Every structure is written in structure tokens, then in C-alpha cells.
Image (tube, helix red, strand yellow):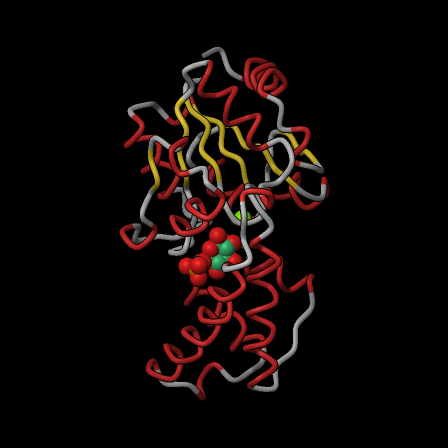
Amino acid sequence: MKAVIFDLDGVITDTAEFHFQAWRNMANSIHIDFDREFNEELKGISRMDSLNKILDYGGVIDNYSDEQKEELADSKNNEYVSLLSELKPEHIYPGIKKLLDALKENDIKIGLASASKNGPTILDRLGITNYFDVIVNPALIENGKPAPDIFLKAALDLGVTPEECIGIEDAEAGIKAIKDANMFAVGVGTVDVMKKAGADIVLENTKELVFSSLLDAFKQTSPL
Ligand code: BG6
Ligand code: MG
């Protein structure tokens, strides 16, 4: 194992919840409502893909021009960014800082493969930017998750092969992306959902993201 590539929202901190709140408020403003089950489909995918899914779910996708969609996406992002102003280092999920320290101590490279254009701001607010050897810019990736492209780009920029990487994700689309990239997939979340998506191991809480356990699990399935 030479690198660990992290998703951000819902893995490093609880911003997945902020996305949910901001999308639901935007949807309610145009008389669409959705629940947490539908929200699972929005996790990991880009801002515009999320909006299109919501409009499709509400049966109104053909009623909006590209310009109106931009306005809706902007209004969601404005609310989301204002929620981010509350974010502090104490909001890093349990176990993450310890894992980042252990990875550094063991010379394992660290990458970020988040679909979020707000990723760099979030890492700064949490005070952990310096841990990351590579932060992939999602704006430069043509095919978003579940396509493997963002994880493959992270590996390429880190100078390692995909088979030498562990990817960590909380979204179905993200687990599929990791597996299609030929990496070892660690799912954080509900066992059934993550297993169905193809996760190699599933942890219900980031507290369980312990370096030695990850290494053991990786070694069991990979000769590298
Ligand atoms: C992903 C989130 O990390 O980033 C999605 O899981 C979100 O919910 C996507 O839509 C894009 O984020 P942003 O901040 O660029 O709108
Ligand atoms: Mg996520």
C-alpha cells in the first residue's frame, strides 16, 4: 500500500449533511421534496448532476433552461457555503487526524478525490490542507463519479499505480468509482449499502479507520 485517497464530504467531516440541507431547501423552494433515501443518490456526484437528478425526481426537468438551472445551483451553493462558515478543526470526524498522522509517519502518500469545488476551502477550515500530497481539481475531470477518473487522476499525480491505493468513500457512486479504478475500497457507512456498491471492507464509523487495520485488510486481498 503506497497511497490512501480520501473522499471528503461524509468521510473527513459531516459536510454531507450540509449538502442535504441546502439541496432540500432549494428543492422545497420549487415545491419538490425528497428524503434521506433519495439523498443517497446525490452523494458523490457533481453539483449540476445533483440538480438534474432532483429536477428529474420532481418531474420538472424540462421546465428549466440552462440559465435557470445555473441560478438554482448557485442558490444551493450560496446556502451551502454559508453553512461552511461554521466549520472548525473540531469538526473533523473521529479517527481521521490520527489516521493522517499515521500515514505521514509511514510515508504513505495522501490524496483527495472529492467532487466538490469547495474541497480546498473545507480542508483549510479544518486545518488539514498540508497533509495532502495531491488534491484533484474536480473541474478538470470530464467524467464524475461513479466513473473512476478522479481516483485514477489522484493515483497518477501521486506517482503510484491504482493497485497500490486504498480509496475511502461514503457514497455508492464513490465506491463504484474506486472499484472501477482497480483500487481497494473502504466504505464508511451502512454495511448493506456499501457492500452492495462493492466495498471491500465497511466501517460504520470513522473511528475504525485505524492505520494497522487498513494495512492488514489491504494485505489480505493484495500481494503488493
Ligand atoms: C460531493 C458531495 O463530494 O461533492 C456531493 O458528495 C456534492 O453531495 C458534490 O454535490 C459537489 O460539491 P460542490 O461543493 O462542488 O457543490
Ligand atoms: Mg462523500
**Residue 196 vs residue 21, the one in the foreground:** 21
Picture residue at 46% right of the left edge, 28% below the top: 4
Q: Quadrant of residue 149?
A: top left
* Image location of residue 133, percent across then percent down: 34, 30
Residue 9 at what x, y percent from top left?
A: 53, 49
Name the image quarter holding residue 89.
top right
- 49 to 186, vertically: above or below: below
**Is residue 98 or residue 171 the one in the foreground?**
98
Q: Is residue 4 above or below residue 40?
A: above
The single residue placed furthest to the top in the displayed view is 223
Is 73 on the left or on the right of 96, as rendered? left
Residue 155: percent from left, percent from top? 34, 30
In the picture, the quarter occupied by the C terminus is top left
Percent of width and height locating residue 30: 55, 86
From the viewer's side, name the closer residue of 148 and 150: 150
Residue at the spot x=30%, y=50% of the render? 141
The correct choice, above or below, for 160 with respect to 68 in the image is above
> Do we see residue 46 in this rendering?
no
